[in-house]
Image (cartoon, rainbow, N blue to C red):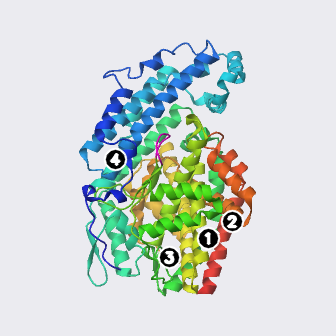
Amino acid sequence: MTNPKKTISRKDVPKKDAWNTEALYPSMKAWEADFTKVIHRSTAPFFPELDGFNGKLHKSAKTLKDLLECYFSIERKLRKLYTYAHLRHDEDIANEAHKKQYDKIGTMYHEFAKEACWIEPEILAIDKKTLQKYRRDPLLQEYAFYLEKLFRQKPHTLSEPEEKILALAGLALETPHKAFSSISDADFKFGSCADKADTHHELTHATYGLYIRSQDRTLRKNAFETLLGKYGEFGNSLTELLAGQLQKHLFFAKARNYTTCLEAALQPKNIDPSVYFTLIDAVHDNIHVLHAYMALRKKALKLKELHLYDTAVPFVQAPDMKFSYEEAEDLVIESTKPLGTHYQNILKDGLKSNRWVDRYENIAKRSGAYSSGCYDSMPYILMNFKGILRDVFTLAHEAGHSMHSYFSRTSQPYHYSDYAIFVAEVASTFNEELLNHTLLQNAKTKLQKAFLINEKLEDIRATLFRQTMFAEFELKIHSFVEARTPITPELLKHEYRTLNEYYFGKGVHIDPAIAIEWARIPHFYYGFYVYQYATGISAAIQLAEGVLHGGRQEQNRYLDFLKMGGSKYPLEILKKAGCDLTTVAPVTNAIAKFATLTKELAKLL
């Protein structure tokens, strides 16, 4: 493995490698001008146009419609401002000007929530007869599903003064997550780690993903221990931050009359908690499938003892599987051929002409990858591309999100353009399935095919098994807070290590350093987010098989799924697409595919 180039400063990033934020605003000055135009007052109320409707929503359907149009118009403008600010902030978290801009719009978002907190309580306070009349009125038909969701939440919607208190608390309660992000992405410096030749390599979040897959076992062991060791040094502080976030989740759950934090996270999306528990139970019932794969890995790597830092390295050698960013783009675009030329052309223009993607790592850039944007922008993709096959899959994943956003925003009105995360992870993982299919079709040798199957197995392991383990950990730590159990570093480390022992099985040596890994996972701050990766890949495998082996009907049904945005509940949207996640079948089918691929790889080896 060659030593990667030294990470550069943001100011040295070439324009072609940076996302096109100037399409949103040509400069920070232009952003400031628009901010002043949208928020033209220096003191509260910042949005006095909302006040004109207060106390009047019972008068007529037109009054309610005018209020909703006013509310969503303001929110849409704020989202555009926020999108630009958060993109610029994530380019360089240490940039003081961008941080101020990001904090400024974040504060104003909270002011907006505070000043609008009376709306839902007042709608729900309208007498039943008038509400029924409103729901039948043609003037409000475009808001019918929005109102249906609102009425469903009536038991969890508080009075206007209480909603105002929750809105006031919102900004302060974001501190744990923001502090974790600053520490992990900007403050932590991991130094370097040595390979077997005692050559030292710069260690960052992005290069860690490279080193942990290195054939040099010394390098991956040192990267594993060095990176996790840094989090271990700050175990007490990181425990307090995560505990603070858990308390935030509990505060809002109890304030809104939910029984548990899990219910508070799932009920607004009309997802029964049984979906969560069914996922965990299905994985537990088939955990032997993962253990069999680990046994194959140990045998293929010819190791006397398989360590956790050995679980990501490809055990099939394929030295030609390195990619330039441009090659990755071409592969991702080619792989979407089963979705038709219209889909392909939009994606091609976005990646190659419109600069949707911020391609490479730079100093103090946010780690990982994501897709972002707003109703009035192109999709934006953050990458930290290093040239390995996993990066190609990451690009396909985020392109799946971005195309979902594109179709949703161009097919739905603003208030239905946001789709639930539950379906978002289906669209992203679906594109990974298409990419894997294309790569296997293009494989020129038995070795390449074996390598790609190995990669697919790792994808399912990381997305289905690992994320279910995360989901189980998240359930445990929330239950501790709900039971008033003190959250300590030792408690978190014990629970996390125990889960690793169960999921990896007796055939894998559980290194002590893994006990602190929870401290580097940003998703634990999101509130029951990670299980959706596991349900997402299960649904994506089922839907992709339908499109790849079906016809025009399956293609159209999937494209219709992308266009539905948030116009229906997520489970209903998936059922229309052809996948029922209220049953265990999609999860067990995905695990069965994992087992089949494991056997196929064993034969190839």
Nearer to us in this view, 443 or 242: 443
Instruction: State the CA–CA distance, disc 1 to disc 3.
Output: 30 Å
Horizontally, residue 91 falls left or right of residue 53, namely: left
Instruction: State the CA–CA distance, disc 3 to disc 2.
Output: 36 Å
Task: Check if mark 1's residue and mark 2's residue have beta carbons within 8 Å.
Answer: yes
* Depicted 435 relative to depicted 402: above or below: below
Quarter assignment of residue 597: bottom right
The residue indicated by pointer 4 is 88
The residue indicated by pointer 3 is 508
**Amino acid type, label 3:** Val
Instruction: State the CA–CA distance, disc 4 to disc 1.
Output: 35 Å
The residue indicated by pointer 1 is 437
x 42%, y 53%: residue: 522
Q: Secondary structure at mark 3?
A: strand
**Amino acid type, label 1:** His
Mark 2 neighbour density, 10 Å: few (under 14) some (14–19) many (20 or more): some
**Range of residues picked out in magenta:** 373-378
Label 4 vs label 3, nearer the camera = 4
**Amino acid type, label 2:** Leu
For the stretch drawn in magenta, what is the main secondary structure? loop
Instruction: State the CA–CA distance, disc 1 to disc 2.
Output: 9 Å
Task: Check if mark 3's residue and mark 2's residue have beta carbons within 8 Å.
Answer: no
Q: Position of residue 474 (x, y in %)?
A: 51, 52
Mark 3 neighbour density, 10 Å: few (under 14) some (14–19) many (20 or more): many
* Depicted 49 relative to depicted 282: above or below: above
